[in-house]
Image (spheres, coloured by chain):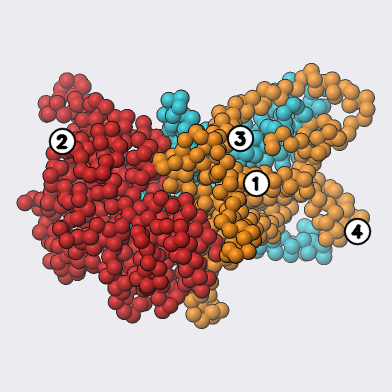
Chain colours: A red, B orange, C cyan
Amino acid sequence: MTMPKKPTLHEMKTGLSRRRFVLTTAGAAAAGTMTGAPAIVYGAETIRTIGLGVSIINQIQSRASKDTGDKIRGQALGYGAMVGKMLNQNDQYEVAEGYFNDMDVLVPAKVFQAIDTKRIKDWDKVSNLTKTGRLTPGSSLGDGDAPFRHLWVDKDANPTKGPSRYISMLPGWHNADSIGYNPEETGRKIESWAELFSPDFKGKVALVNAPQIGTMDAAMGVEAMGLIKFGNKGDMTRPEIDKLIAFLIKKKKEGHFRAFWETFGQSVNLMVSGEVAIQSMWSPAVTAVKAEGVPCIYASPKEGMRGWHGGCAISARVTGKKLDAAYEYLNWWLDGWAGAFVARQGYYMSAPESSKKHLSKEEWDFWYLGKPAAKELTDPFGTPIVKKGEIRDGGSYEARFKNIAVWNSLMKENDYLVKGWTEFLSA
Amino acid sequence: MLQTAPPHAKRHHGGLIGDQPAPPPQEAARLKKSKRDQTVHPGWLVAPASIWLIVFLVVPLIGIVVFSFWTPVRGGMTPDFTFINFGNFFRQDGFFDPEHRNFLKLSIFITTLWTTFRFTVTVMVVCLIIGYPIAFFLAMQVKNFKWQLALFLVAMVPFWTSYLIRAVAWLPMLGRRGLFNKMLMNLGIIDKPSSFFLYSEFGYTMALAQLYVVLCVGPIFFSLAKIDKDIIEAARDMGASNFQVFREIILPLSLPGVAIGMIFLFVMLMGEFATAVVVYGGKTSTTGTVILNYYATANYPFAAVNAIMLMLAMMIGVFFILRVVDIRKEL
Amino acid sequence: MARWTPRRTRALAVKTGFSIYYVLFIVFIFGPMIAMFALSFQGRRGGTSFPMRGFSTYWWEKLLEPSSIGDLQGALARSLILALVVMVITALFSTMLAMAFRQKFRGSNLLFYTVMLGLMVPGVLLSLGLATLMRQIGIPPAWWSSGLGVHVVWTLPFGFLVMMAVFNRFDSRLEEAARDMGASEWTVFREITLPLILPGIVAAGLFGFTLSYDEFARTTLLSGEYNTLPLDINASMTQRIRPTLFALGTASTLFSLCLIGLFIVVYTILYRRSR
């Protein structure tokens, strides 16, 4: 087993010079003086890939360039800009690092091509989470846009009911979100989504300000309180939305919410600066709060968590050599190095066994198995984020994904939902 | 909409700008002649900008108007002509149905536009109150152009830090454990941290004023700086009080600048979508955020409808400001 | 030395009062940035809000290193170049438009409101509209082409209105006199008009620079393969944000203030020499 390298500032600098190295060697090859592996350099294609800062990280793409011999150029975007670009400009990228909850929009728009699983080397290593929806045989499927509901397509990228040779997007990094809270402020352990609406925390609660996700977190809370029973939280009906929004408006008028956050950093700041005691939160954000010395726990509600799943899709416009290079990049994602990289940020990878090769035993035990950290662990940039002896909230990978209540979704009634959310915020 | 002729267009002589002192008749005739002979034809002056605007504004705008009549579907829109998007903007389930909770309640999109408008006007007034004295100071008290420009530039410096960065800095400044609370506590004004400054309507109003006040200082400064100091001296010599000088001379002559500043503020504030999230904690909706929300989930037709309504409201506002202070007559 | 007449004393008092008000105004304007300045010296383990966890220049050093998300230095360079080009075009177009509007010409009302529309159209939709169009024609968007296009659409109304304020009650007798003496139209403009309206042109250009440098929504679909600075910062917001951003903000503030200082010095020297 290879020991993971601890990337340092020094390595970040060499990362840059490595890229420069690739360029100079390419030039040298053109001049005919190359002695190394000219085949790789000659075949170099430029692959443009777009996505969020979750997967478009310079270290990842420059490593991919080095390993594949192609030039992988990442462009990180904000969420709105990313979806807009994927949908409207598929001539501007070869690979789209998107999310399964947007497939409802992206698949009918035909901006991606079907990915042939026969060309994915490690397809059999991809876990069943995205293939059947169950990580382990006893896992719950979860409401909403679970990846397995959007994964399978036919040769022409039309959705199919069941498994097929073709997929819409190669499953990649994923995680499950729940509630983050400051135990000193709440004074008790939080074990249910219902606590989001507990009068004890009035004025110290925040929700994520995205209609699609915010309502889902709220729905989890309201259902846990026993107020509304939802048929399918991932696809609510109009009367359900009406009831939920009415409840939220009542709470807002009581002054229950401190704020609604939109970015990762905002949620971290809200918690660190003591503005809120409990809020909907992403797992790496909780890690960031703790790294700043403020106590913060990532709750594992008994009702289950809200999952999301990202991956790599290929633009419908890509053909020929570029297509080969795009497949090569996709294969590289499953190879393990990238999986280990995102694991150190708190995300999981669809082929965990490959990632294991590139993680130290201590890291694997902590991030995937939920065991106490045997030593201090760092994030992929070398900053220490986990103290020795710490345990990852939410337990092991299996425990987390066994109990996904709902997946990030784009509901059929999305327009109505956005309208309701607007009413809520305006109230 | 675009071709609405301002009412003064006919009675006003000469160009739209350049309300020059009327020359004696025989000189006027000569001027007219010389102008026709020598002046560069305005067509040449407006051509480059017009072409630019047609390519980068008018054509995409036509696209937006067309989109607003298309049918939204999953994954974008289809070119099937429909009024449904406009209908959805105005229609509210159960409106005028006495049994329904929405009886006599306007559609949320109209309400949002109205809220946006109300906030805009409030902030405009605040900005004017804060900004006018600054423009007055720069134009009337600072004599040297060098210093006038330098002091104006200093006020513009915060703008040169991306608002996305400044936005992050609001919380450590105004939050419960922020600098402002600490300062007030050290001064003994309050004895426990207040959550009033951030995520409140007050904080939001002040933040918007802070962000945009510079926009109205500039134009007011320019119209004040042009006032002939001799007129003011003359009025003083005739025994006018400072207040009279201000009311009778300075204020009327600065109105075009005020109007232009108000146009800037009105349009910027109506289109605002970012500050509400950061400083008000997203506790309100503006038409700008509604547009973004529908844009994000690819309902482009409905986003376009909201955009058209917003532009219509802005157009009416600008038109109204120009009616009150006819800058084009003053110009 | 003039005597301290009551009127002079009063004038001085008024001036002092206004100066104090100006300082308060600057404090108000810079308010939220004070926290930014302080937090840019946050300790290594600290974050983007209080409490301070030590004191260090770690985040300032980070500013010079390649970022992990996006390309901070490259994006900054692109945004600066774009803003400078927008500044020049805005100043040029606004001056030309305002000069034209001194006369009456057909379609002037239509043009006036079209320019104003650039101010009103919501950015994301303008970018969507133009992106769709460009795709139909088959021209790829780029920050220096389509990005530049919509930035000027956005900044032009500001510059134009500023120039309208400048030409307001503009005394054209000087120009007429020069024309009568046989000066060419270009000479009249260069020797008489330009010096009078130069402050306005500078202001129009500054509005152009400022608004373009900060513009985000209009660029979303139109910047092509490379991000401008606001797009890059927006992208980094999907991850943990670091005080590096604050160091960047502080650095740009200090840099701007230095430029203003430099401007005063240069201006003073040039002014002396010309006398």
Q: Secondary structure at mark 3?
A: helix
User: On the image, numbered disc 3 is attached to which residue?
Assistant: C91
Which image quadrant for residue C46?
bottom left
**Chain of the residue that carries numbered disc 1 in the rendered image:** B
Q: Nearer the viewer, residue A118 or A235?
A: A235
In this rendering, which labeled residue sits more in front, label 2 or label 4? 2
The image shows residue A172 at horizontal and vertical percentages of 23, 47
* Circles 1 and 4: CB atoms closer than 8 Å: no
Amino acid beneath label 2? Lys
Q: Are marks 2 and 4 on the same chain?
A: no
The image shows residue B63 at horizontal and vertical percentages of 54, 33
Q: CA distance from mark 3 to mark 4?
A: 42 Å
- Mark 1 nearby-residue class (10 Å; few <14, some 14–19, many ≥20): many
Residue A174 higher or lower than C3, as above or below: above
- Mark 3 nearby-residue class (10 Å; few <14, some 14–19, many ≥20): many
**Chain of the residue that carries numbered disc 3 in the rendered image:** C
Q: Nearer the viewer, residue B175 or C221?
A: C221
User: On the image, numbered disc 2 is attached to which residue?
Assistant: A118
Amino acid beneath label 3? Ala
**Chain of the residue that carries numbered disc 4 in the rendered image:** B
Q: CA distance from mark 2 to mark 3?
A: 58 Å
Q: Are marks 2 and 3 on the same chain?
A: no
Residue B290 higher or lower than B82, as above or below: below
The image shows residue B160 at horizontal and vertical percentages of 51, 48
Residue C178 higher or lower than A144, as above or below: above
Q: Residue at x 54, y 35 (%)?
A: B81
Amino acid beneath label 4? Gly
Q: Is residue A124 visible?
A: yes
User: On the image, numbered disc 4 is attached to which residue?
Assistant: B239
Amino acid beneath label 1? Met
Q: Is residue B134 left or right of residue A197?
A: right
